[in-house]
């Protein structure tokens, strides 16, 4: 059951990731610099998430949480930010037809990093490799 | 240069999920999401502060409609999408989750066909077929 839930969450995440650019594109049609759009979008999520944590009473737990876990989450946020900035930078100096397909190979990096760093908790078999390759090639052909 | 930046983007986006999966062993999901959102927001504010764009006053010139579109995009992408994506790490492997959620361009294309009546090129049909096959393989993984 939990396996099914995880898959459904990943599929629904994909739906959200797929619909969001349509609204972002509508906003960018005004000529706004993408960094401002990303700041508004990110700021919205940050405000809602902060409210959720405060109103649900989770705010009191923040002082006692594991520092190493926070360090890893910060590293994740830094990588996120590097990805965001390098994407817009690449788009501003390169061709969209080249930049977008290259950035779509990111699941391959996840696959490699998972194999080398969290092998114990990851089951990487032929289905994982084949599925990931099919999705990456399919997405590159589609975009 | 743009190729190198694109590869850097893919690399950074690819490994961020590994760090987050490792972080979620020690901290709850909402805290993990809040931390990454805060870092992202600070990075964007820093970039605008050092001169990317036309400074902070530019936010006053943005129309209400444009704000509305980015608020919607932010809610769907940065909040709901990310929460679902990170939450799935608790139940399936990060590789499986990342690959399934990476199929999102298909959703955009289907939406473009349905709403904007756009037409697809033959290679795009092949791409959709391959992507759906990949998603099916990953969905069926571990099932009997």
Image (cartoon, coloured by chain):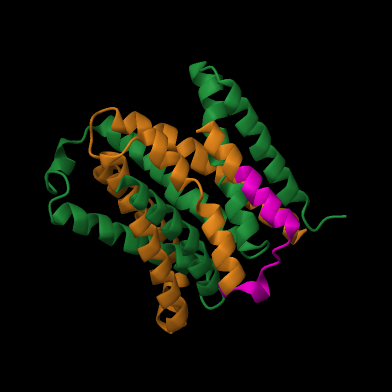
The answer to whether residue A30 is left or right of residue A117 is left
Q: Position of residue A71 (x, y in %)?
A: 41, 77
Closest to the observer, B76 or A78: A78
Chain B hue? green
Task: Tell me if residue A90 comes above or below residue B19 in the rendering.
Answer: above
Task: Tell me if residue B93 comes above or below residue B101 in the rendering.
Answer: below
Image quarter of residue A15: top right
Instruction: Specify start and end residues of the magenta stretch as a single range.
Output: A117-135
Task: Tell me if residue B9 comes above or below residue B68 in the rendering.
Answer: below
Q: Main secondary structure of the magenta part?
A: helix
Q: Position of residue A56 (x, y in %)?
A: 48, 65
Asked whether residue A125 is drawn in magenta, I would say yes
Q: Position of residue A54 (x, y in %)?
A: 41, 66
Image quarter of residue B125: top right
Chain A hue? orange
Q: Which quadrant is home to the N terminus of chain A?
A: bottom right
Q: Residue at x 55, y 40 (%)?
A: B104
For the image, the number of numbered tags is 0
Q: Position of residue B50 (x, y in %)?
A: 13, 56
The answer to whether residue A107 is left or right of residue A41 is right
User: Is residue B72 at all visible to an observer of this figure?
Assistant: no
Q: Residue at x 51, y 49 (%)?
A: A105
The answer to whether residue A11 is left or right of residue B13 is right
Q: Residue at x 34, y 39 (%)?
A: B70
Image quarter of residue A78: bottom left
Q: Residue at x 54, y 17 (%)?
A: B119
């Amino acid at each position: 059951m939990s396996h099914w839930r995880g898959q459904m969450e990943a599929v629904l995440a994909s739906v959200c990731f797929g619909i969001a650019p349509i609204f972002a594109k509508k906003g960018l049609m005004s000529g706004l610099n993408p960094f401002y759009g990303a700041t508004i979008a990110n700021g919205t999520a940050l405000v809602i998430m902060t409210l959720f944590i405060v109103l649900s009473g989770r705010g009191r737990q923040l002082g006692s949480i594991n520092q190493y876990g926070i360090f890893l989450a910060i590293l994740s946020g830094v990588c996120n930010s590097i990805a965001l900035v390098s994407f817009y930078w690449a788009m501003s100096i390169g061709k969209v037809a080249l930049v977008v397909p290259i950035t779509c190979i990111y699941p391959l990096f996840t696959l490699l990093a998972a194999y080398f760093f969290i092998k114990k908790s990851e089951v990487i078999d032929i289905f994982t490799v084949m599925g990931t390759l099919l999705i990456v090639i399919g997405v590159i052909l589609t975009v | 240069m743009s190729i190198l930046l694109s590869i850097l983007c893919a690399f950074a986006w690819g490994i961020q999920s590994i760090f987050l999966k490792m972080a979620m062993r020690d901290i709850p999901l909402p805290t993990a999401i809040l931390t990454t959102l805060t870092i992202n927001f600070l990075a964007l504010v820093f970039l605008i502060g050092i001169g990317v764009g036309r400074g902070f006053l530019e936010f006053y010139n943005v129309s209400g409609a444009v704000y509305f579109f980015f608020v919607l995009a932010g809610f769907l992408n940065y909040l709901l999408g990310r929460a679902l994506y990170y939450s799935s790490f608790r139940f399936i492997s990060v590789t499986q989750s990342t690959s399934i959620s990476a199929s999102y361009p298909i959703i955009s294309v289907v939406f473009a066909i349905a709403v904007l009546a756009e037409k697809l090129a033959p290679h795009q049909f092949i791409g959709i077929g391959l992507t759906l096959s990949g998603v099916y393989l990953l969905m069926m993984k571990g099932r009997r």
